[in-house]
């Protein structure tokens, strides 16, 4: 009877054992590393980022953590979703904290990678290869893992904590962070402080960024009388353009000399990069060589630190780079302001005037971390939209002893560095608490 009973049950027992083994394996595989790998495997590279898969993955993660979940849409065809997660604080009237990252990444050329860029393969020495591993899917998952750890430790924040995932950062953010930050929904969050992406640090100090540089595209154009290639005459279009290029080059060198002399970091000066020159009359074999053209044009990409004086530069362009007296015209496309809504330089103070800064520093040193001198980021991130509102925002991706591989082939992040980053995030509970801050911020 016993035996019969057993044999009748055995298929069920077998199935039970099989299922429980599978569950166990799945549980073993559901780790901070595998969750990071799964997010990296979602191809959100331009030009066709798969935002809906990324959002649904993050949503599932957030729901498992009992966070409030909202998907916001600010474009008519709802193809640029923003995911907003909320962990309600015990005093929701206090200014909240926002942890931001972008969903998208730049494209990858698979043939130039040693691993498929969306496989998130982990090598035997722990390197996780994927487009977005550093920029910036690491922080996206680290925020969630930190919350998971805090919740597991029965921590509950005083302030409300929000986590946002925005589209289109890599293509300028105009349909992503710019729309979100300008919305009523954002205003209602009453954000007091923001952490956004930073960059890897090859040394053992963590890097933190308090400002971005603002890009300007400057096009200068000249017009002149056309003439035979054999003639020498004044005010030809090319002559006028060449004079301007000399002036621009001198300005570029003056900025570069400051960097070369070690008096400023590369990101603290105005950089000027010549990007194109357009002139000449095309012929089937190239250009007509015995004719001086009547029009010529050159384009420059400039990057202005928040300490630069935009009015001074605008005047300089009008008077020296493209003066009317030399038949020149110009266009400046300013990609964002370099002053905030109150007319202050677009930067987050990294001194005692900013109480969040002290708390941030404290959170790093409390876990034995070293912080490098705060930097201006040479390029731009979504943090600029937040700073524009006068809200303090720091760029911080905790990746020490890591080569800077954003936008490069074979982008990777070492597993131990990624895990250490969760520990840092965990220690941001300083930010969550900070009761002494509350009165100052309010
Ligand atoms: Zn990024």
Image: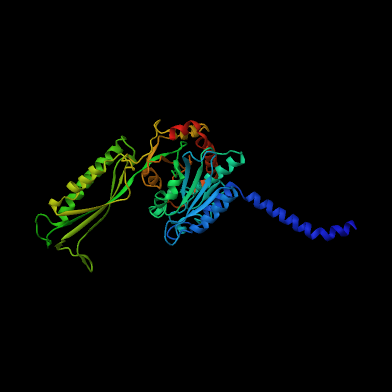
Horizontal relation, residue 279 to residue 182: left or right: left
On the question of residue 303 being in view, the answer is: yes
Residue drawn at 22 percent across, 56 percent down: 297
Give 335 or 65, whichever is nearer the viewer. 65
Q: Quadrant of the N terminus?
A: bottom right
Q: Position of residue 300 (x, y in %)?
A: 27, 51
User: On screen, 264 above or below 120?
Assistant: above
- The residue sitting at the front extreme is 93
Image position of 194 (left or right of 141): left
Q: Position of residue 163 (x, y in %)?
A: 50, 46
Residue 81: horizontal and vertical position, in percent? 47, 56
Q: Is residue 67 left or right of residue 239?
A: right
Closer to us: 285 or 302: 302
- Which residue is more in the foreground, 114 or 34? 34
Task: Judge whether 81 appears above or below 138 on screen.
Answer: below
Q: Residue 336's x, y, as percent?
A: 33, 48
Q: Using the rendered view, name the quadrant where residue 290 is placed.
A: bottom left
């Amino acid at each position: 009877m016993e035996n019969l009973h057993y044999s009748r049950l055995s298929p069920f027992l077998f199935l039970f054992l099989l299922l429980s083994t599978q569950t166990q394996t799945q549980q073993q595989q559901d780790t901070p590393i595998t969750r990071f790998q799964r997010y990296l495997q979602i191809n959100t590279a331009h030009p066709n980022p798969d935002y809906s898969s990324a959002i649904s993955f993050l949503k599932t993660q957030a729901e498992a953590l009992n966070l409030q979940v909202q998907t916001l849409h600010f474009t008519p065809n709802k193809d640029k979703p923003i995911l907003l997660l909320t962990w309600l604080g015990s005093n929701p009237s206090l200014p909240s904290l926002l942890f931001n990252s972008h969903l998208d990444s730049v494209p990858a050329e698979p043939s130039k990678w040693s691993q498929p860029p969306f496989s998130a393969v982990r090598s035997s020495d722990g390197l996780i290869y994927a487009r977005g591993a550093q920029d910036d899917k690491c922080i996206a998952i680290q925020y969630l893992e930190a919350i998971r750890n805090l919740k597991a430790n029965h921590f509950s924040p005083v302030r409300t904590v929000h986590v946002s995932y925005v589209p289109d950062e890599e293509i300028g953010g105009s349909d992503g962070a710019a729309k979100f930050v300008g919305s009523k929904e954002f205003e209602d969050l009453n954000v007091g402080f923001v952490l956004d992406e930073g960059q890897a640090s090859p040394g053992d100090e963590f890097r933190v960024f308090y400002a971005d540089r603002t890009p300007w595209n400057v096009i200068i154009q000249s017009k002149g009388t056309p003439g035979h290639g054999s003639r020498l005459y004044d005010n030809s279009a090319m002559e006028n353009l060449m004079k301007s290029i000399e002036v621009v080059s001198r300005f570029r060198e003056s900025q570069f000399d400051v960097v070369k002399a070690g008096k400023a970091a590369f990101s603290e000066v105005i950089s000027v990069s010549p990007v194109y020159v357009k002139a000449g009359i095309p012929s089937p074999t190239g250009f007509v060589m015995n004719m001086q053209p009547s029009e010529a044009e050159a384009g420059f990409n400039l990057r202005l630190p928040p300490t630069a004086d935009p009015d001074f530069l605008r005047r300089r362009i009008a008077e020296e780079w493209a003066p009317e007296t030399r038949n020149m015209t110009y266009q400046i496309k300013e990609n964002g302001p370099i002053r905030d809504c109150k007319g202050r330089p677009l930067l987050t103070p990294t001194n005692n005037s900013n109480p969040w800064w002290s708390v941030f520093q404290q959170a790093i040193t409390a876990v034995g971390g070293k912080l490098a001198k705060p930097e201006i980021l040479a390029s731009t991130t979504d943090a600029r939209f937040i700073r524009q509102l006068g809200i303090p925002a720091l760029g911080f991706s905790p990746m020490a002893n890591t080569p800077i591989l954003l936008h490069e082939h074979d982008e990777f992040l070492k597993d131990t560095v990624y895990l250490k980053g969760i520990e840092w995030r965990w220690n941001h509970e300083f930010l969550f608490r900070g009761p002494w801050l509350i009165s100052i911020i309010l």
